[in-house]
Image (tube, rainbow, N blue to C red):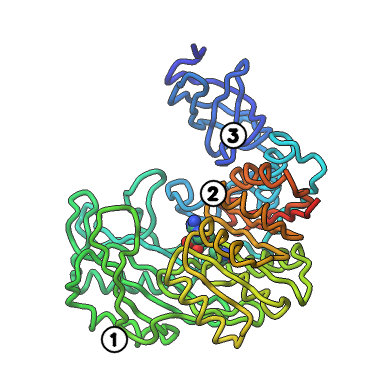
Amino acid sequence: MSILQKNEILEGHVIDLTHEGHGVVKLDRYPVFIPNTLIDETIKFKVIKVKKNFAIGKLIEIKEQSKERVEPPCVYYYKCGGCQLQHMTYQAQLNMKKEQVINLFHRKADFKDTIINDTVGMENPWYYRNKSQIPVGKNKDEEIISGFYRQRSHDIIDMESCLIQDQLHQEVMNQLKVWFNELNINVYNEHKKQGLMRHVVIRTGHHTRELMVIFVTNGKKFKQSDLLVQKLVKAFPEITSIKHNVNNTHSNVILGAESNTLYGKTTINDKLSDVTFKISDQSFYQINSIQTEKLYQLAIEYANLKQDDVVLDTYCGIGTIGLYMAPKAKHVYGVEVVSEAIEDAKQNATINQFENTTFVCGKAEEVILKWKSQGIKPDVVMVDPPRKGCDETFLKTLLELNPRKIVYISCNPSTQQRDAQYLAQHYKLTKITPVDMFPHTTHVEAVAQFNRI
Ligand code: SAH
């Protein structure tokens, strides 16, 4: 039984941070998690939830402040669910992300000899998102608003500025909101599951500055589309593509299956290093282009490629990593489950005039088996799975393929640690470097090098 009572007001000293960035106060050995507090702070808090093994507190007063505390620059910070770490200096955020990787690999697993490097941060950690997905709704006065979801809810907070997305996205959205109100656009109501305009998605090629605007509607009929397209193109000459996506489902997934081009090209281009990438509205593309280049540079360095190496790029998206490596390798095989992304990958190989690449649509765990039966012998395997990590069949086959090196990029170091334990049967995990792809949020990305023992 807990010693705490709900609504009780207590004082405590923060000794740790959870991976969500919440401070931890221990009373006896019972932990209380308190958002917006930092290590070494003495705080007054209210107990708002009591569970068997932990409690949740709400910060009431900071008695002694950490020197790592800063005033969050964004006015919406305490309401919006987008950022979680703006009350911390950027250096403290980078340290926290490294600490999480150390905790997982050195303390919770037996990778004591693995070098864990400092988190690679951004020089200017703002305005980095090249994709914004902005929900549209109405406030109590029936005015159209757009912004971001309140923390842990789907209430829309109306916003005029966001410090982590490309600045041009906000300018486009602020202007669209004025036109939506003037034209009295029918907007979607999530509770009633009625209405038309659900989201506006904006994507930019960070280096090319090509801009795509996608209107996501519930239903096909979108009367004012011509007028909005005319206005947008006139006001923002940077726009190279405008799309209409239909999403009739009532799920949290933002884009529906069907997209039509209303203006310009069907895709946008971006460039990473010397390689050009074509990106469809549906394809995964790394959100932070500046950090992606650093991440891929590290991945290439860890792969230690030789010109006659055969490389597998597994979970390849639009082929970015493999295409980055193609000029330095003999042949690159890529696999990805989203068919649009594989189409992009194939076209990207053509655009860049690479003739030594093969991209296959399918599940990595199935395609890798096929490659093995075809006698393909990779020297280097790049692994970049979604949050849930790799399927065990995949890892088993990977060990059987026995490449010289495995480079594993992960957006969830806890599944990366699980998979690393499997690979440790035949591979030494030499080093890991966290790369800060999402400043001011708790997301941690890490690249790891495995050498065959
Ligand atoms: N390497 C790419 C994409 C990484 S994101 C890049 O750096 O841009 C992970 C990718 O894995 C996504 O594109 C997702 O569609 C894909 N994916 C998810 N499950 C998969 C599976 N079982 N097999 C193959 N690809 C999968």
- Name the residue located 50 percent from the left edge and 14 percent from the top edge: 2
Real-space CA distance between mark 1 and mark 2, rounded to the nearest whole angstrom: 47 Å
Relative to 359, 252 lies left or right: left
Near mark 3 (Cα within 10 A), the count class, few <14, some 14-19 or many ≥20, is many
Q: Which of marks 2 and 3 is in front?
A: 2
Where is residue 387? Give x, y as percent. 53, 50
Q: Residues within 10 Å of mark 1 (few under 14, many from 20)?
A: few
Mark with earlier residue (3, 1): 3
User: Considering the numbered disc 3 on the image, is that residue within a helix, a strand or a loop?
Assistant: strand
Labels 1 & 2 near each other (Cβ < 8 A): no
Residue 340 lies, in percent from the top left, at: 42, 72
Residue 318 coordinates in the image, percent (x, y)? 52, 71
Q: What residue type is labelled 1?
A: Gln
Residue 23 — which label?
A: 3
**Which residue in the structure is indicated by mark 2?**
391
**Front: mark 1 or 2:** 2
* 429 sits to left or right of 163: right
- Residue type at mark 3 is Gly
Measure how far apart labels 2 and 3 are at the Cα level: 33 Å
Give whichever of 186, 314 is nearer the camera.
314
Q: Which of 85 and 259 is in front in this view?
A: 259
* Residue displayed at 78% across by 48% down: 428
Percent position of residue 22, x then y? 56, 37
> Between disc 2 and disc 3, whose residue precedes?
3
Direction from residue 283 to residue 354 in the image, left or right: right
Disc 2 within 8 angstroms of ligand 1 (CB): yes
Please indicate, yes or no, whether residue 163 appears anywhere in the rendered image.
no
Q: How many marks?
A: 3
The residue tagged 1 is 230
Q: Residue at x 70, y 58 (%)?
A: 406
